[in-house]
Image: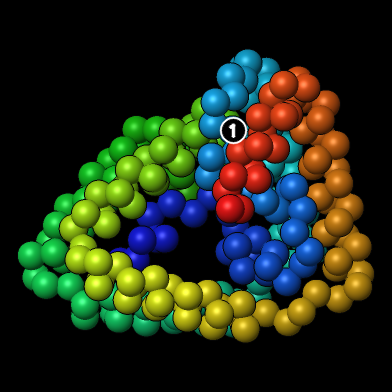
Amino acid sequence: MHLKQVFFPLTTAAFLVLPFAPPSLAQDAFACPDAFEGIELSDRQEQQVAQLETQFEVELDRVLPISEGQFEQLEQLEAQLDSQIEALLSPEQFQQLQQLDRWAENQVRQIAPSLFEENEREPQLTAEQEARLDALNTEYEKRAEAILTPEQRQRIEQLEQAFDAQAEAIFPELTPEQEAQLEAAEAQFEQGLKQVLTASQRQRFEQNVAACGE
């Protein structure tokens, strides 16, 4: 069990391959759990934002598909990371984190039960659901970190950084065609946001995204 494991709103392709491309507002928005913090969206806006995010993810999966072999390699890296982290924990800590996992899973089932349904298509979450999941993820990490010693947290961070580097190495660099397609998808996402959000909402959104990168 590692701290990134509980919630994963992006596809694996988005998480791992996007760092190879120049950063954009669309990429930063997906990487920022607090992008919509403090922004009151209407029901209509929530639906529109969720649709924009889904469209971007679908296009991302098309441009940057993951092969079965790459997926298996990622699973092996995940298992290796889990084992390395579990080796750092005492039996009592491991039990506490298992209890925390069960609590978090129950919370997720209440917030977004569709995440646990078997469906070939990715579930489409509302902006409110995503915001609640982001808040839950923050609370989960806070509680998990309280269980660990400073030395354990530092070592886990080192292990996760090594995991990120190994995971990114699985994928080749983007081709010029992929970069162009990705830029087009990002531009469409950003243009859609401009049309959905008011000027003040847009300003707050950009401030939130910028704060995530600091």
Provide residue 34's location: percent of width, then percent of height: 53, 40
Q: Amino acid at mark 1?
A: Phe
Asked if residue 78 can be seen in this view, the reply is: no
The residue sitting at the front extreme is: 214
154 left or right, relative to 15: left
Residue 154, picture quadrant:
bottom left
Q: Residues within 10 Å of mark 1 (few under 14, many from 20)?
A: many
Q: Nearer the viewer, residue 150 or 165?
A: 150
Provide residue 153's location: percent of width, then percent of height: 30, 67
Which residue shows up at 75% across the image and 47% down it? 25
Mark 1 element type: loop
113 lies above or below 170: above
Coloration of the structure image: rainbow
Asked if residue 143 can be seen in this view, the reply is: yes
32 lies above or below 11: above
Which residue shows up at 63% across the image and 49% down it? 30
205 lies above or below 71: above
Q: Quadrant where the N terminus lies?
A: bottom left
Q: Circle 1 is placed at which residue position? A: 36
Residue 77, picture quadrant:
bottom left
87 left or right, relative to 45: left
Residue 92, picture quadrant:
bottom left
194 lies above or below 149: above
Q: Nearer the viewer, residue 141 or 203?
A: 203
Which residue shows up at 53% across the image and 44% down it? 33
Numbered disc total: 1
101 left or right, relative to 120: left
Which residue shows up at 80% across the image and 40% down it? 190
Provide residue 186's location: percent of width, then percent of height: 81, 50
Provide residue 78's location: percent of width, then percent of height: 42, 75
5 left or right, relative to 178: left
